Amino acid sequence: MTHREDDVVITENTESLDDIHAVIGQVAALMLKAGSPLELAALSAQLNLHAGQSADARVKKEYEGAARFVADKIKP
């Protein structure tokens, strides 16, 4: 699905990427607030942890997608 918003083409993938970025930001903020170092491997682990704890299928999918997104950045 595609639509226009303020002269920007918005697709489902764009919206999904926005959701992934939002989830990463939320978890990163929690890690920083807790005094944890913000490293990709730790961020990916926290995203997977949150995915495993979620009972909401949509939220679980967002956290899993974000974890994969971060994990892909770790690979050489």
Image (spheres, rainbow, N blue to C red):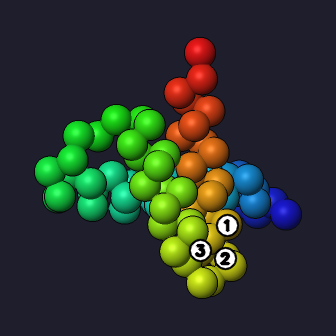
Q: Amino acid at mark 3?
A: Val
Residue 64 location, x and y as percent?
63, 58
Quadrant (top left, top right, bottom left, bottom right) of the C terminus: top right
* 7 and 47: which is toward the camera: 47
Residue 69 location, x and y as percent?
60, 42
Give the CA separation, mark 3 to mark 1: 5 Å
- Quick one: SS at disc 3? helix
Residue 59 is labelled as 3
Residue 48 location, x and y as percent?
54, 57
Residue occupying image coordinates x 53% and y 27% = 74
Q: Are marks 3 and 1 in contact (CB under 8 Å)?
A: yes
Quadrant (top left, top right, bottom left, bottom right) of the N terminus: bottom right
Q: Amino acid at mark 1?
A: Lys
Residue carrying label 2: 58
Q: Amino acid at mark 2?
A: Arg
Q: Left or right: 73 with respect to 61?
A: left
Give the CA separation, mark 2 to mark 3: 4 Å
Residue 61 is labelled as 1
Q: Are marks 2 and 3 in contact (CB under 8 Å)?
A: yes
Q: Left or right: 39 with respect to 54?
A: left
Q: Are marks 1 and 2 in contact (CB under 8 Å)?
A: yes
Residue occupying image coordinates x 66% and y 76% = 58
In this view, 40 is above or below 30: above
Query: How many C-alpha atoms fall within 10 Å of the one at disc 2: few (<14), some, or many (≥20)?
Result: few
Quadrant hosting residue 38: top left
In this view, 35 is above or below 41: below
In this view, 73 is above or below 57: above
Residue occupying image coordinates x 21% and y 47% = 36
- Quick one: SS at disc 1? helix
Residue 45 location, x and y as percent?
47, 49
Query: How many C-alpha atoms fall within 10 Å of the one at disc 1: few (<14), some, or many (≥20)?
Result: some
Give the CA separation, mark 1 to mark 2: 5 Å
